[in-house]
Image (spheres, rainbow, N blue to C red):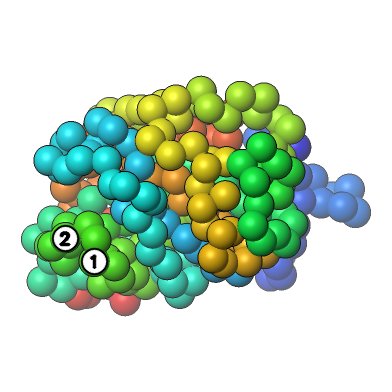
Amino acid sequence: MKHVRFIAEGRLQRGTYADGMITTPAGKQYQEAGIDVWLPPVEPNKIIGLALNYADHAEELGLEKPAEPVLFIKPNSSVVGHKAPVYYPDGATYMHYENELAVVIGREGRFIKREHALDYVCGYTIANDVTVRDFVNNFYRPPVRAKGHDTFGPIGPVLVDKEDIPDITNVELRTYVNNELRQQGNTRDLMYTIPELIEFISSFMTLEPGDIILTGTPKGISHVYPGDVMRLEIEGIGVLENPVLDGRTEQ
């Protein structure tokens, strides 16, 4: 099942999505095209990102696989929904998308063993870990300024129950900018798997319902500019789309 949060008729609503139609718990239906505002399908508790987790992306950046997952916290103030604008910061010279499978935690846990890790997952969504490359100098240094700007965390449009993606280790990711394919990858190329990440993170941090783990991005990052439209697709989940606006003039 695909779960959504949205604003329609002037109020926040929840529902399930199928075949272009949203159905609320009360049974009222809305066409996808009639949604006023798409909200992130999850209200994050905390967002834990990986600075590097695809071998081809590491090669693209001239980096080796780190000895352990390199983590950072992405601020909740960066989160926006499907169709919301992403603002290009004043003074940036290289801003890019990062298409990432986002793992949503459904149960509290600490010291979780990898063989039981997926028991703590409730589902998956799409995240765009927008980054200003200018502010990334060394991937061992937390890239907070590079990734923490307001609007730099589009998430959505749906949360898919984990049972509806039978093999999360083999799903395709594709990113388009202005309908041009720029990035393509597959979760089979993750250097650290989802169970390994959950085991590692929970060894020192309690994972709680609503926490989101961003699993990294594959090769293919490229510059985006004001006026561009970023379209991220993940097999079995859907499409997350956001326009880029000039932050100097639009906010």
Residue 138: give its label: 2
Q: Is residue 153 visible?
A: yes
- Measured in 3D between alpha carbons, the distance from the residue under mark 2 to the one under mark 1, in whole angstroms, is 6 Å
- Residue 236 lies, with reference to residue 82, above or below; the image says above
The residue depicted at 81 percent of the width and 51 percent of the height is: 24
Determine the secondary structure under disc 1: loop
Q: How many badges with numbers are in the image?
A: 2
Label 2 crowd (10 A; few <14 / some 14-19 / many >=20): few
Location of the N terminus by quadrant is top right
Q: Which residue is mark 1?
A: 141
Which percent across, then down, holds residue 184? 32, 28
The residue depicted at 71 percent of the width and 49 percent of the height is: 120
Which percent across, then down, holds residue 37? 57, 60
The type of residue carrying mark 2 is: Asn
Q: Residue furthest right?
A: 26
Which percent across, then down, holds residue 126? 50, 45
Which percent across, then down, holds residue 161? 71, 40
Q: Is residue 49 left or right of residue 205?
A: left
Location of the C terminus by quadrant is bottom left
The type of residue carrying mark 1 is: Arg
Q: Nearer the viewer, residue 176 or 46?
A: 46
- Residue 145 lies, with reference to residue 29, above or below; the image says below
